[in-house]
Amino acid sequence: MAREIALVTGAGGEIGHGLIRHLAEFGIFDIVALDLRPLPPELSRRCAATLVGDILDRRLLDALECKAKISRIFHLAAILSTQAELIPETAQEINVQGTMNLLHLAGEAARARGEAIRFLFPSSIAVYGLPDLTTKRKAGKVGEHEWLEPLTVYGCTKLSCEHLGRCFARNYRQLSAGAPGGVDFRAIRFPGLISAFTTPTGGTSDYAPEMIHAAAQGRSYACFVREDTRIPFMAMPDAVAALLRLADAPAESLRSAVYNVGGFSPSAGELAETVRTAFPGEQVTFAPAPHRQAIVDSWPEDVDDAGARRDWGFRPSYDLDRAFDEYLVPNVRDRYIAR
């Protein structure tokens, strides 16, 4: 009997690497991976099929022969925050229209299967927009329904996609014959993510992983935010585990379509000290870039993830010390020593 399929878009990105490894280890699904570029061989061989293509190509998505076997979609493809500010029209097309295309695919797959398709979407703390530092510092842990006035194109696109996902889940084709819906949309608002195995590619929170990867290579690093800047971060294994746990959660246990998750919330100065301790002699300095600083200042210092803990048992494994000691430092060192 043919196995069900998990479709992963943006498969070659930071989250995709870890997600595909875990899905392959579980052995429950055949993985179909879609990315603009060919996947590395180590990742490709874990997949049943790999597709090189664009999520804006509706003909490609409509022609997927595996549609009737798809039971889960992990839609990871997106243009990230810094890049989105530079090319806003493209960010709108890829992040919003691309998501619309995948939601349409999920609806078609649901009709082919006769049951709802679970659609996992990585949203972001960029959906928040606190107006000033005083408000940010007073706000404490920000909940899912607070301060939803993003300052960036990226944040606007992620918030738009959350609304689209809810619409497809609750009301899509509500005026058409037959039952509406068919899309079981589930989103996680991730904080800044730090990976030991992939290098940063355009996120405004990437000062943390850039700092670590530079130190491991013996390069100095000038951080683009102030030392007192504070936002939440998460180690990549916790991010992948959260996606998989939410994907497996019974629908009846979920009280929301969108959940915050958090990990640890150090200041940039505290991160720099941790990096200097792990890599003695390496230089981390601070040269705030005003526009990028303003973006990070609009994001919460921390998030309230009580809903995720209550509804689907979210529990991060890594605090700051464990993330560095057990995950980041040994793996980042091995990565660059191997070169």
Image (cartoon, rainbow, N blue to C red):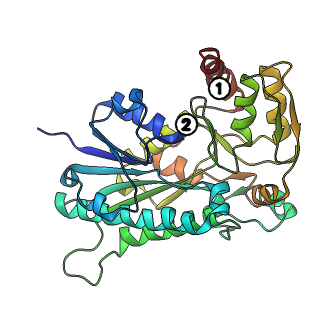
Residue 291 placement: quadrant: bottom right
User: The disc labelled 2 sits on which kind of residue?
Assistant: Asp
Residues marked 2 and 1 touching at CB (< 8 Å): no
Alpha carbon separation for disc pair 2 and 1? 13 Å
Name the residue at 60% across, 34% down. Answer: 195
Mark 1, Cα crowd under 10 Å, few <14 / some 14-19 / many 20+, is many
**Residue at the (65%, 59%) spot, across then down:** 126
Tell me where residue 287 appears, x and y as whole percent.
Answer: 88, 45
The one of 156 and 249 positioned closer to us in this rendering: 156
The mark closer to the camera, 2 or 1, is 1
Q: x, y percentage for residue 262?
A: 63, 46
Helix, strand or loop at mark 2: helix
Rendering coords of residue 178 (x, y %): 19, 77
Vertical placement of residue 296 versus 146, above or below: above
Q: Residues within 10 Å of mark 2 (few under 14, many from 20)?
A: many
Question: Which quadrant of the figure has residue 184?
Answer: bottom left
286 and 176: which one is in front?
A: 286
Q: Left or right of 164: which side holds 336?
A: right
Q: Position of residue 103 (x, y in %)?
A: 36, 64
Q: Amino acid at mark 1?
A: Leu
The quarter of the picture where the C terminus appears is top right
- In the rendering, which numbered label is found on residue 328? 1
* Left or right: residue 57 compared with residue 133: left
Give the label on residue 238, or none.
2
Upstream in sequence: badge 2 or badge 1: 2
Q: Residue furthest bottom?
A: 175
Which sits in the foreground, 70 or 204?
A: 204
| Quarter in which the N terminus is drawn | top left
Residue sitting nearer the eye, 323 or 328: 328
Which of the numbered marks, if any, corresponds to residue 124? none
